[in-house]
Image (cartoon, rainbow, N blue to C red):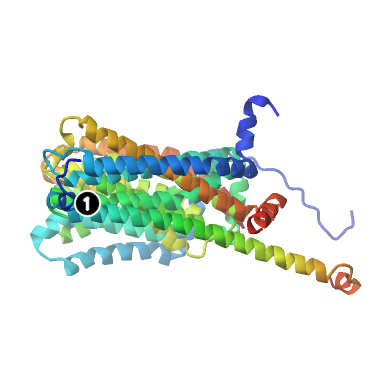
Amino acid sequence: MPGKWQWFHKLGSPRWFYGIADRFNPLLLGSALLLLVAGIVWGLAFAPPDYLQGNSYRIIFIHVPTAFVAQSVYIMMAVAGAVTLIWRMKLADVFVRSVAPIGAAFTFLALFTGAVWGKPTWGAYWVWDARLTSMLILLFLYFGIIALGSAISDEKSSARAVAVLALVGVVNIPIIKYSVNWWNTLHQPATFKWTERPAMQMDMWLPLLLSVLGLYLFFTWLAFVRMQTEILHRERRTQWVRQLIQQRKG
Amino acid sequence: MVFDSLQAFIAMGGHGPFIWTCYAAFLIVMVGLVFWSFQQRRQVIAQSLRQQRIEQRKAASTPVSPSESELT
Amino acid sequence: MNSPVRTVTVQPVKVSLPAAMMAVLRRDLQVSFRQRQDLFNPLLFFVIVVTLFPLGVSPEVSFLQLAGAGVLWVSALLATLLSLDSLFRHDFDDGTLEQLVLQPQPLYMLVLAKVAAHWLVTGLPLILLSPLLGVMVHLDGNSIAILCLTLLVGTPVLSLVGAIGAALTLGLRSGGVLLSLLIIPLYIPVLIFGTGTVAAAADGGSVSGHMALMGAMLVLAVTLAPLAAAASLRISLSNT
């Protein structure tokens, strides 16, 4: 095997990945919790109140990270889908299968926090704001992926079908975003353009950055944990998984 | 700390209920995800162990019985 | 050669791509015309759903004028969705689809032909019927013309994107509901631009920009959707 691509082929080996994940998991979880707690405590207690919204803006320290991670997880899934289709790499499908529920949960959180934040800001829990609507559609896309994945029993064709759907979805995301923005300007007078205020202050921006990074790390940790479970399930007939499980028991 | 007291921190200038609802939901969903993921892990391991035990029992009960091989 | 069994030598027949596409198109049209039920059900569904809105919300002329285009678009979308399940289903059940996949012609083009046939028997009748329903929801003449134009560009996109979903859910037990779940989010841009164009026309604005956007969506759908649908068909067939 040519040395240049060895890491790539190794990456396709579930066993190799399982070991790597085992090694990185404590580090990932530790740094994720550290950053998340630091970012959130800073944001809740030490960042200055917003001159327009007062304290309600403090929801941003979980709203933006969940929305951010939720969107990028879908793109990651599409990339993994392409890898599944082109190189038939098993691990890519394990990734898609494991992270789809996480992505859906984060999308839900972004929607929920956005809606609750909307009450003091816009005076209503739900406003057909362009971003909220796009997130809602993203949630539907996640549900589609999860539903299709669980509807097809054959592992191989399920993987490829989900990969195609993820790719179709990712092509559509820019179109959906654009159309929803366009629709929003058509229907909504610009009453809540508070997002277009001057750039964020440093002591609001830094805690936000910390919590975004923290949530990314948390996502990575949880994705690794769930991928390991998926690997244990799929490779349950192999010798190494049998030994591993026997060791865990003892 | 930008708040004078703990009460002020909890009240968040009147926005407390909204903020704390969000953070509670965040915590619940996160903990729920982690809990669910580890429960799945436990299930997979338990299932695999059960499978192994069944196979061991099978292997122990039918080592070289000729009737078995005739049947198949 | 006294053997009672006649030997038949099969000559490989070379069929050109346009001829193959025409054959698929003609066959699909014939099949649909023989099963009239499949042809009329989506149309009937379209009319009934449009009827529900004045009954369910309000028969006020002002409401209907405001919501009419949206109601017609949503109903057309749902009617298309309803008809999608049969796009590949019959061919899948009787094995024709497998033959289609094995043809030397690119599956992409054959899928395109099948989608064209689907549009001709569902999308086109919807468009022809929509002026009538437009009058019933008190749209003015100009709005009806624009509505038909948007449907003309939009319904092929619905058929094309829907073909992906139909191909993905082929052979699954809960295919119909799952298909809706997968496809409706992807239909949202078409719906937005379709109704937005009519609204812009009603406000007296120019619609050429909007129509250009819809045209761009159609071009994108024609190029990419058959690709995804063909890949999905191969996946679904390998599943069985």
> Which type of secondary structure does the marked residue at label 1 adopt?
helix
Q: How many marks?
A: 1
Instruction: In this rendered view, identify the residue nearer to me: A33 or A113.
Output: A33
Residue A192 visible here: yes
- Residue A73 visible in the snapshot: no
* Residue at 20% from the left image edge and 41% from the top image edge: B1
The answer to whether residue C83 is left or right of residue A181 is: right
The residue that appears at 60% across and 55% down in the rendered structure is A233
A41 or B35: nearer the viewer: A41
Please report the residue visible at 65 percent of the width from the left and 30 percent of the height from the top.
A6
Instruction: Tell me where residue C182 appears, x and y as whole percent.
Output: 41, 54
Quarter of the image for residue A219 reads top left
Residue type, numbered disc 1: Ile
Classify A158 as above or below A24.
below
The residue under label 1 is B19
Q: Residue at x 13, y 46 (%)?
A: C202
**Rendered location of residue A218, percent (x, y):** 42, 44
Q: Position of residue A201 (x, y in %)?
A: 20, 31
Q: A2 and A86: which one is in front?
A: A2
